Every structure is written in structure tokens, then in C-alpha cells.
Image (spheres, rainbow, N blue to C red):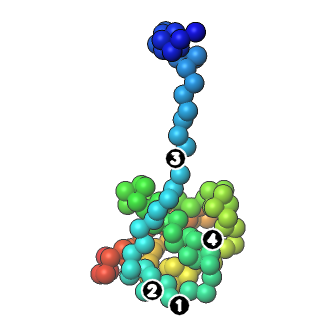
Amino acid sequence: MSVFDDLDSLRNATPEQKQTRTKKWRRQFVRFPWAWAERMKSTQRASTYRLALLLLYEHWRTRGQVIVLSNVGLEQEGLTRRSKWRALAELERLGLLLVERLPRKSPRVTLCYLSGERS
């Protein structure tokens, strides 16, 4: 069997026969504004930083739309629902975001302090 036979068999293969490897996409970077770093110096919990990084990533991914924070989505990131609420309260106290709380619904978050100036 020659190399050319292998090439012919690949060319004539159906899509089911071709073994394609799908590349799994992973998050690798988050742009963290220096203004947030300055304001977060007084935070007391690591979960606040984790949630801030997640919110900044989601803000970029959704192109600035309102972010709905479900408990299930945050559990995959290692945040419990209790730590989510504590971190949200702390970030809101720092003036970095606004939280819309609805009964029996996930909170809706709007980031409001992304540059050196308040928006």
C-alpha cells in the first residue's frame, strides 16, 4: 500500500468516515479595568473577585447587555448561591454594578463602572 492509496481513500471518504477533531474552546483571558482593581482593594472575600472576573467576561461576551446570574451557572464556576449574593452586595456597595432583584428570579446585573469615569 502506498501513500497515494491512502490519499485516494481520504479523498473518497464520506463525512462520517472522516475523523475530524473538534477544538474545544476555553476561556483564557479577562480584561480587568484598573478602576475596578482600585475599588476592589477593600474587598474581603475571594468570591467577590471570582464573581467580578466572571461578570467582566460575560459583559464582554454579551457585548454589554444585562447579565442574568443563575445559581446553576455559577456553581460550575465554583460559587455557591450564598457567596453569589454576598459578592453581589459587596460589588454593588463599591459602586461597580447595579443589581435588579426580582422575587423568585435570578438577579439581573448591569456593570456601571468600566472606565476611569462613572457612567
Give the spatial CA distance, label 4 vs label 2. 19 Å
Q: Is residue 41 above or below residue 106?
A: below
What numbered label is drawn on residue 84? Answer: 4
| Foreground tag (4 vs 2) | 2
Q: Secondary structure at mark 1?
A: helix
Q: Which residue is mark 2?
A: 39
In the image, which is nearer the foreground, mark 4 or mark 3?
Answer: 3
| Residue 58 visible | yes
| Location of residue 76 (image quadrant) | bottom right
Disc 1 and disc 4 in contact, CB within 8 angstroms: no
Three-letter residue code for mark 2: Arg
As helix, strand or loop, the secondary structure at mark 3 comes to loop
Q: Position of residue 58 (x, y in %)?
A: 47, 60
Q: Which residue is mark 1?
A: 42
Question: Crowding at label 2, few (<14), some or many (≥20) Cα neighbours within 10 Å?
Answer: some
Residue at the (53%, 40%) spot, across then down: 23
- Say which quarter of the image contains residue 31: bottom left
Q: Earlier in the sequence, mark 4 or mark 2?
A: 2
Query: Label 1 is placed on what type of residue?
Result: Ser
Cα distance between the residues tagged 3 and 2 = 31 Å
- The answer to whether residue 65 of the structure is visible from this angle is no
Real-space Cα distance between discs 4 and 3? 25 Å
Give, as a three-letter code, the residue at label 3: Trp
Q: Is residue 52 left or right of residue 103?
A: left
Disc sitting over residue 25 in the figure: 3
Which badge, 1 or 4, is on the more N-terminal residue?
Answer: 1
The quarter of the displayed image where residue 115 is located: bottom left
